[in-house]
Image: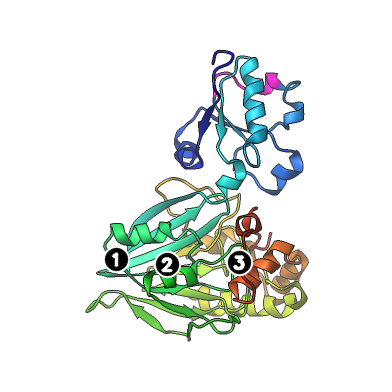
Amino acid sequence: MAHGEPISRITTDQLVPLLDDEERLYLLDVREPDEVADWYIPGVHNIPIGSLESRVAEVPRDAHLVVICAQGARALLGAELLARHGIASEVLEGGMNAWASTFDSVAGELAGATVVQLRRRGKGCLSYVIGAGPNCVVIDPALDLDQYLDVARERQWIVTHVLDTHLHADHISGARALVEATGAALWLNPSDHFDFAFEPLSDGRAIVLAPGVELTVAAVSVPGHTEGSTMYQLGDAAIFTGDTVFLESVGRPDLADQAEQFAHHLYRSLHERVLPLSDDIMVFPAHYGARVEVAVGQFVARPLGQLRSTLPALALSEDDFVAWAIANVKDRPPNYQHIVLINAGREAMGSGVAELELGPNRCAVA
């Protein structure tokens, strides 16, 4: 780039496919180390903006370089500094704030149904559209309704039911808004307390997706992360586990002051409802953490049999499991407390929703 030329920019949607396919990609985060430690794009390199001039020799000159900060201002300064040293780069538009609401998706066939997994890459949030015949259900939708409406429209599905796996604490649920937009039924577990109208779920209650086809999405109560945690089973092919079991851990008891009670419930849910299932059944969680690789075109999911051998918590005795969970549980961050009140219908959303949701999910036992 010649001196004085405008700095190039790249959107978060353009960045997503590069994370898998661009070998030369080099992500340079110019935020402070504590900001990066709390929340980052996997594979990023951190050189704070105040140190970049003295450390510019560390920046590769032959890479596809993307400069990142919280909202874009510091990244622009960094890109201008690099340009003065003859290093071309692009600024990530909107920075980490934009990354928080960036989605991609992957679809596949399971048990005669089509499962579309929508991945909110900056939050590690996963939601699902499951369709067969003319109908589909949506599990754990985010507030960005266009993601779900577009999937249904493209596949000519009618959204008949909207489901949440539990009362979410890390992000605002889009369930009520999606119901309002589509006229679908809202099914929730009343063991989590919601202050708005919904149809209460009970164990084994099933949704028939396609007329004349023995294909159901069935509810299974799995208290522990929250008392109303529910997983949904798609035939013998898949379970949508919410925050009960992840690919890298299990859900943390969501209330620190009731951690021991919730941990016992979670242990029993895992051993009585999840682990008796077939090794071949696919586990689709509601979140993933930084340790989980996410690839374009591949589900964030694993066979249950694989998780039996990779998640040490599943092999613990009940006493050891409870002790481990209690030792690792923390109080909800302040923003989580507000999000719970919003999702329960006890507090209005207001104008600061985007800021409330910033940061990673913290729903697993670390």
The reply to whether dot 1 and dot 2 touch (C-beta < 8 Å) is: no
Q: Which of marks 2 and 3 is nearer the N terminus?
A: 2
Q: Is residue 180 above or below residue 124?
A: below
Q: Which residue does the numbered mark 1 point to in the structure image?
A: 157
Instruction: Say which element carries label 1.
Output: loop
Q: In this view, does 134 lie above or below 195?
A: above
Q: Name the residue under label 2.
A: 281
Q: Nearer the viewer, mark 1 or mark 2?
A: 1
* CA neighbours of label 2 inside 10 A, class few (<14), some (14 to 19), many (20+): some
Position in image of residue 363 (x %, y %)? 64, 63
Circle 3 is placed at which residue position? 349
Residue at screen point 59% across, 62% down: 171
Residue 60 is a magenta residue: yes
Q: Position of residue 261 (x, y in %)?
A: 71, 80
Judging from the image, what secondary structure is the residue with disc 2 in? loop
| 1 and 3 marks in contact (CB < 8 Å) | no
Q: What residue type is labelled 3?
A: Met
Please name the amino acid that badge 1 sits on: Trp
Q: Disc 1 or 2, which lies upstream in sequence?
A: 1
Bounds of the magenta segment: 56-63
Q: Is residue 339 left or right of residue 330?
A: left
Crowd band around label 3 with a 10 angstrom C-alpha radius: few (<14), some (14–19), many (20+)? some
Give the residue furthest to the front: 351
Query: Do the CB atoms of the residues marked 2 and 3 lie less than 8 Å apart?
Result: no
